[in-house]
Amino acid sequence: MEEFDWDEGNKNKNWLKHGVTIKECEKILLDKPVIAKDPKHSLVEVRYSALGKTSKRRFLSILFTIRDNKVRVISARDMSKKEKIKYEKNKKNI
């Protein structure tokens, strides 16, 4: 995952909805996040969820897919309490 697909449809949506920047999304996805397939949201294409922490200690949950060998972020927001527990548990096991 080295290239990202940011078009007008997804460039500013996470900033406007959740205050998450493009740089935060990219940093999370490049810094060994906890990744899992998201079968619930994979009806049309395979989607994944990534849990990670920014350098400013912000815990983010990112839903993404891979299109034409590029990462396309679908949504990004702060983690829920349940997701934080899952993230911390998985990070300890690495």
Image (tube, rainbow, N blue to C red):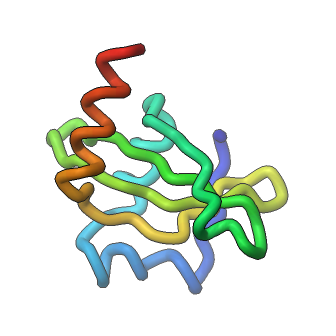
Residue 71 appears left or right of 90 = right
Residue 27 versus residue 62 in the image, above or below: above
Q: Residue 28's spot in the image, x, y percent? A: 40, 43
Q: Horizontal placement of 31 versus 18: left or right?
A: right
Q: Position of residue 8 (x, y in %)?
A: 57, 84
Residue at screen point 42% across, 79% down: 12
Foreground of the two, 73 or 44 = 44
Of the 4 image quadrants, the one containing the N terminus is top right
Residue 8 sits above or below residue 66 on the image: below
Give the residue drawn at x 45%, y 70%: 75
Q: Residue at x 22, y 36 (%)?
A: 55
Marker count (numbered): 0
* Left or right: 30, with 72 as reference point: left
Q: Is residue 9 left or right of residue 70?
A: left
**Residue 71 found in image quarter:** bottom right
Horizontal and vertical percent position of residue 38? 58, 57
Residue 45 quadrant: bottom right
**Residue 49 at what x, y percent from top left?**
50, 53
Question: In percent of the image, x 41 and y 14: which residue is there?
Answer: 94
